[in-house]
Amino acid sequence: MTDIQKSVVIGNGDFILNDRIKALLDSSERIVCADGGANHLTDTGYSPVLIIGDMDSILPATVKKFNKTEIIEDTDENTTDSMKAIEYEISQGMDEIVLLGATGKKIDHSLANLSLLKRYDQLARLTILDDFAETVFVLKDLTFEAEIGRKISLMVLGGSSWVTTKGLKWELDGELQSFGPFGVSNQVSEPSVTVKVFGDGLFLFKLFEKSDGTPIVG
């Protein structure tokens, strides 16, 4: 069985170097920065193997800091810096790509980055990780292990889907879901959770918090 190749792509959104993020960076084969995402790493002890983008956000001090890092300047206006980084990593054979710095500063940029989970779903397994949640796109079926009491949100953004769940406090049984607030803050009730989707897919947010407000660490 071929080992899974994991890459981390760092964008220019909010970035907090907590223990969870450090463990991710330590376990990844490659760290790639999308333009100004490299600014987040200058004082962390981590170095990217590549910086790619139109180079309008990276600071001169960051370029100097990572003077031995490969830089690809790509000024294609039809793709965002995050798209450039993701597509490059897919071309390098990466099976899993985790996006950091993909949310926070601007809601339009956050939504644009969220759409990338769906855009590249058939090419690699993409995850957005921030200080609040781990977010993935589910097109058909997904089963995962989770802590009982953990908060889970299921949201359809664009189109509609019929959704069935098992292992949540408020189950769905083939119900039609569309863009709206009704899938927010469900709760894990069993150690294994299954989500089955028929339609345009949905976004699954695994929040780093339990129903009683207890933070999930690690």
Image (cartoon, rainbow, N blue to C red):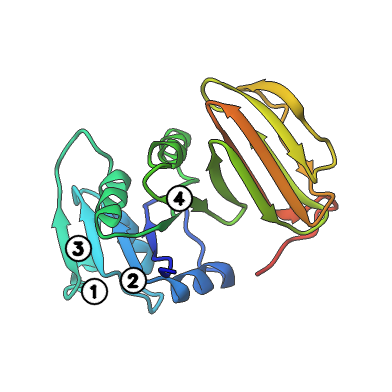
| Residue contact at pointers 1 and 2, CB within 8 angstroms | yes
Q: Nearer the viewer, mark 2 or mark 3?
A: 2
Find residue 192 and report its image quarter. Answer: bottom right
User: Camera-side residue: 58 or 197?
Assistant: 197
Mark 4–mark 2 Cα distance, whole angstroms, equals 25 Å
Q: Nearer the viewer, mark 1 or mark 3?
A: 1
What's the amino acid at mark 2? Thr
User: Camera-side residue: 171 or 65?
Assistant: 171
Residue highlighted by disc 3: 60
Characterize the local packing of mark 2: few (<14), some (14-19) or many (20 or more) Cα atoms within 10 angstroms: some
Q: Which mark is residue 42?
A: 2
Q: Earlier in the sequence, mark 2 or mark 3?
A: 2
Mark 2–mark 3 Cα distance, whole angstroms, equals 11 Å
Element under disc 3: helix
Q: Earlier in the sequence, mark 1 or mark 2?
A: 2
Q: Nearer the viewer, mark 3 or mark 4?
A: 4
| Residue in the picture at 54% in, 54% down | 130
Percent coordinates x, y for residue 86 in the rendering: 32, 50
